[in-house]
């Protein structure tokens, strides 16, 4: 969180950065701007389909434009 806040302060001081919980109770770690980008942070070495469920809900309920996962996997996908 501190790194995102520092980046935002330097590069885009007016960028809104927040945590979100949908009406259905689904949580996403960070949402930037006006639902421009949702970011989920996973500490594991592998991201599973269940880890991505929140993105589908968020796209349906809040019309988020893009989604990204920050994780420890070796390969990008």
Image (spheres, rainbow, N blue to C red):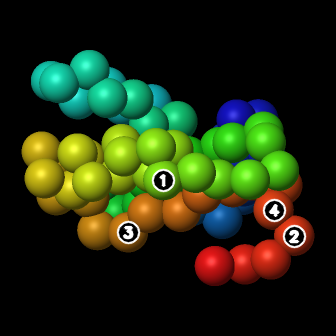
Whether residue 59 sits left or right of residue 67 in the image: it is left
| Mark 4 and mark 2 residues within 8 Å of each other at the beta carbon | yes
Residue at (43, 63) in percent of width and height: 67
| Mark 1 and mark 2 residues within 8 Å of each other at the beta carbon | no
| Residues at marks 3 and 2, CA–CA distance in whole angstroms | 22 Å
Residue that numbered label 3 is attached to:
66
Residue that numbered label 2 is attached to:
74
Q: Which of pointers 1 and 4 indicates the residue nearer the eye? A: 1
Residue at (23, 45) in percent of width and height: 57
Query: Judging from the image, what secondary structure is the residue with disc 2 in?
Result: loop
Residue 9 locus on image (x, y percent): 66, 49
Q: Which of pointers 3 and 2 indicates the residue nearer the eye? A: 2
Quadrant including the C terminus:
bottom right
Residue 49 numbered tag: 1
| Residues at marks 1 and 2, CA–CA distance in whole angstroms | 17 Å
Quadrant including the N terminus:
top right
Residue 5 locus on image (x, y percent): 67, 42
Query: Judging from the image, what secondary structure is the residue with disc 3 in?
Result: strand
Name the foreground residue: 68 vs 16: 68
Whether residue 40 sits left or right of residue 61 in the image: it is right
Q: Which of pointers 3 and 4 indicates the residue nearer the eye? A: 4
Q: Please rate how many residues cluster around mark 2, counting C-alpha atoms within 10 Å: few if below 14, some from 14 to 19, many from 20.
A: few
Residue that numbered label 4 is attached to:
73
Task: Answer whether residue 35 is visible to the viewer in this image.
Answer: yes
């Amino acid at each position: 969180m501190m790194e995102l806040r520092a980046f935002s302060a330097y590069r885009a001081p007016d960028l809104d950065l927040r945590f979100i919980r949908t009406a259905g109770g689904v949580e996403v770690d960070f949402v930037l701007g006006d639902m421009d980008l949702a970011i989920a942070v996973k500490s594991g070495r592998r991201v599973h389909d269940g880890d991505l469920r929140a993105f589908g809900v968020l796209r349906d309920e809040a019309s988020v434009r893009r989604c990204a996962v920050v994780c420890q996997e070796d390969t990008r996908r």
